[in-house]
Image (spheres, helix red, strand yellow):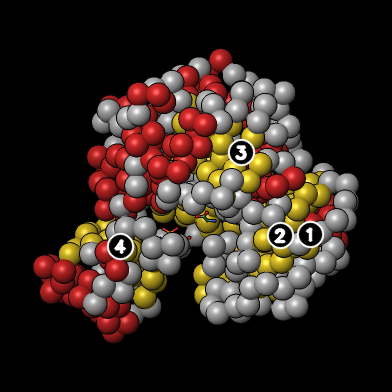
Amino acid sequence: MNILVIGSGGREHTIAWKLSQSKRCKNLYIAPGNAGTEKVAQNVNIGVSDFEGLKNLIIEKNISLVIVGPEAPLVDGIRPYLLSDNRLKELKIVGPGKEGAMLEGSKDYAKQFMVKHGIPTAGSKTFTKETLSDAKEYLKIVKMPIVLKADGLAAGKGVIICQNLKTATATIDKMLAKAMFGDASKMVVIEEFLSGIELSVFVLTDGNSYKVLPEAKDYKPIGENNTGPNTGGMGSVSPVNFAQGDFLKKVEDSIIIPTINGLKSDNIDYLGFIFIGLMNVKGEPYVIEYNVRMGDPETQVVIPRIKSDLVELMVATTTGTLSEVELEIDDKTASAVVMVAGGYPEKYEKGDSIHGLDLEVDGTVIFHAGTKKSEGNIFTNGGRVLAVTGIGNSMQESLDKSYGLVSKIYWDNVYFRKDIGHDLMTLA
Ligand code: AMP
Ligand code: GLY
């Protein structure tokens, strides 16, 4: 079948890499893709928000399966947009409709959903510009630190943890009265601070049954030992050794099953990935956030651990037959080290020539994100440039593989964290 992946990051490169290995994949397109996706798919220069352009491509290329990588097109309703065209009634789309996508598109909506369905999460209250003075009064009675979350999509930047009343008051003022995150902070969720270790669990659902994919941990801050500003993600590992057995069973019983049942009982059209950000608080899982797509760079360690045919899983997701498909997981460890342009997540240069990309090392895969090809050479074209995934029989072996290859790839001003996975090795 002909397949389209929408997006241009490391997540989409990984999904396309895996789809391309399937016998069922005939022509694979990616819009817009990057310099790495060209090796496994045909890049088509159409942006993720150009719904009309994407629709025309789907019709022209006779595409029957679409996988939507990032959240923005889902929140903006790409699913209902495509399905409303008579010619695309049979199109299989992995990704929820507009209401389902609100689980990520509105933190307040997600909170209401969790409270309604008894899913463990931090206590919270939501405020708007009109109730700003109530918000300030509320801040006086809550325990510090406190978490302020812009309700809408804010490119991963909308969460601010405040250590004291003074900064919390100033921050809520900026968010609500001064539109710090534009429309995204028209509403703000004030949420109790949870202390624990974070991890992410990924679920694939066809709206009825579900499969739990490998869990992962990502490393968000730019600096080693989790210091400095947050990024989209500087690395990831899977499996997560502190979250096995009993803990994962608790996640399934108290979070995954009530989430799937809640979507059904609320008549929410949901099929696709659910990415559940969790905090392990003394052995008890709490939901920090829902995302309605895979994580980046978590995908770069989750997908390589899936042995089953991804096309088959994607088709089953869209045809309500997921329960009939077997999900086989590799028990090896995968780790991904993200290489970024120096300066990221603040100001950084683009257009540096990347060296060492042709190296092929057993047990490693290079997934591209911000890269661009020009006259046969590959150049940096974004903050997060590459992720190098290593696969091994232990965390140490997988890290040795990723870092071994990372050390051979370079460009001017390359930066990467040297401590991915280290915290988990000391916990083991
Ligand atoms: P989010 O965008 O919701 O993933 O939040 C970004 C980051 O903020 C998370 O990955 C956590 O590290 C942190 N965070 C969010 N909510 C909480 C919370 N209630 N308690 C502690 N940390 C949190
Ligand atoms: N790595 C976090 C995310 O994809 O949202």
Q: Residue at x 44, y 62 (%)?
A: 155
**Label 4 element class:** helix
The residue carrying mark 1 is: 376
CA distance separating discs 4 and 2: 34 Å
Choose the circle earlier in sequence order: 1 or 4.
4
Give coordinates of residue 59: x percent, y percent.
Answer: 48, 30
Lower position in the chain sequence, tag 4 or tag 3: 3
Q: Residues within 10 Å of mark 4 (few under 14, many from 20)?
A: many
Asked if 126 appears above or below 245 in the picture, the reply is below
Q: Nearer the viewer, mark 1 or mark 3?
A: 1
| Quadrant position of residue 146 | bottom left
Which residue lies at the image location 38% right of the left edge and 63% below the top edge? 154
Tag 4 near tag 2, CB within 8 Å = no
Foreground disc of the pair 4, 2:
2
Q: Is residue 386 left or right of residue 205?
A: right
Instruction: Give how far apart the Cα atoms at labels 3 and 2 are.
Output: 17 Å
* C-beta proximity under 8 Å, tags 1 and 3: no
Residue to which mark 2 is pinned: 373
Residue sitting nearer the eye, 291 or 332: 291
What amino acid does circle 3 point to? Tyr
Q: Which residue is mark 4?
A: 184
Question: Does residue 290 appear left or right of residue 128 in this picture?
Answer: right
